[in-house]
Image: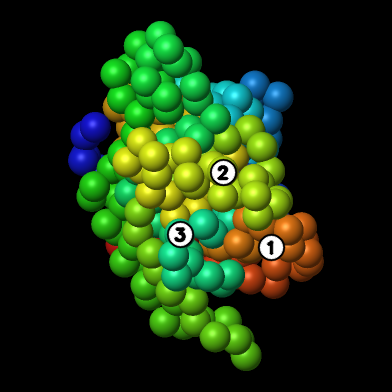
Amino acid sequence: MTNNLNTVSPTAILSALEQEQGGLIAQLHHPQMVRRAGRDFWCGALQGRPVVLGLSRIGKVAAATTTAAMIEGFGVGRVVFTGVAGGVGPGVRVGDVVVGAGFVQHDMDASPLFPRFEVPLYGQTIFSGDVALTGLLRQACEAAMRQGLVGGPCGQVHHGLIASGDVFVSGALQSEAIVRSLLDCGHAPLAVEMEGAAVAQVCADYGIPFAAVRTISDRADDTAHTDFAQFVTEVASVYANKIINQMIELL
């Protein structure tokens, strides 16, 4: 994948949930809403840089459609994803963030025709985040974490594998089974979610740099549903706003 970070073309900012983009939409200069592929996209400038904001929706197919629509419809030069995830890696705690080094579909299984987790006809299991763009995103996350939340502690920044699948992982046994199956094939995930690997694959198809960060909302166990909406509003949305603004400054 190319590392061209020429900022003349717009930066696509994707989020799974509307709460994470409300603050960003309000900050846009000359905002314009464009409807494409049944989705509402917001175009404008953020800190003088052209951006397109979009909601991936939930799940791999919806996220892939949104990503393709942004690339085809707006000529974006890079895609940055923010969202929440369940933490499954050692030391990954609620309130931390995970920047994706690579992305794997934990529910991909075309065996015995192809090795488990390998995407058929691609010859690869993991789609890597763009090195340069991911490096900038890590810097942005570290700066945002230093600022922390008003009255709250700073989370830690992790960098590693993110696993995606069309299932909300909300039980300890379910989470352990997913992690064990990936580890058996040499893949050690730090977080699980429902969109990132699909977006990474679409970006690879188009040769568009991709980077993603996930705020850890739970440990992907039996408490995963507890106060989820409150966490997104009070923590994840605040971090997403800070991280994206720091990121735009670095481009």
User: Is disc 2 placed on a helix, strand or loop?
Assistant: helix
Q: Could you tell me if the residues under marks 1 and 3 are in contact, i.e. CB atoms within 8 Å?
A: no
Query: In the drawing, does residue 113 fall left or right of residue 217?
Result: left
Residue 228, given in percent of the width and then of the height, sits at 74, 61
Q: Earlier in the sequence, mark 2 or mark 3?
A: 3
Circle count: 3
Q: Which residue occupies the extreme bottom position in the image? A: 151
Q: Look at the numbered discs 2 and 1 and tell me whether their residues touch, using CB distance below 8 Å.
A: no
Tag 2: residue type?
Ala
Q: Which residue is mark 2?
A: 177
Q: Is label 1 or label 3 in front?
A: 3
Q: Quadrant of residue 39?
A: top right
- For disc 2, the neighbor class at 10 Å (few under 14, some 14 to 19, many from 20) is few
Which labelled disc corresponds to residue 85? none
Front disc: 2 or 3:
2
Q: CA distance from mark 2 to mark 1?
A: 26 Å
- Residue marked by disc 1: 232
* 1 or 3: tag closer to the N-terminus: 3
**Residue drawn at x 54%, y 59% as measured from the top left:** 87
- Relative to 110, say whether 67 is above or below: below
Q: Earlier in the sequence, mark 2 or mark 1?
A: 2
* Distance (Cα) linking label 2 and label 3: 13 Å
Task: Give the SS element for disc 3.
Answer: loop
Amino acid under label 3?
Gly
219 or 103: nearer the eye? 219
Q: Residue at x 24, y 32 (%)?
A: 1
Q: Which residue is mark 3?
A: 89
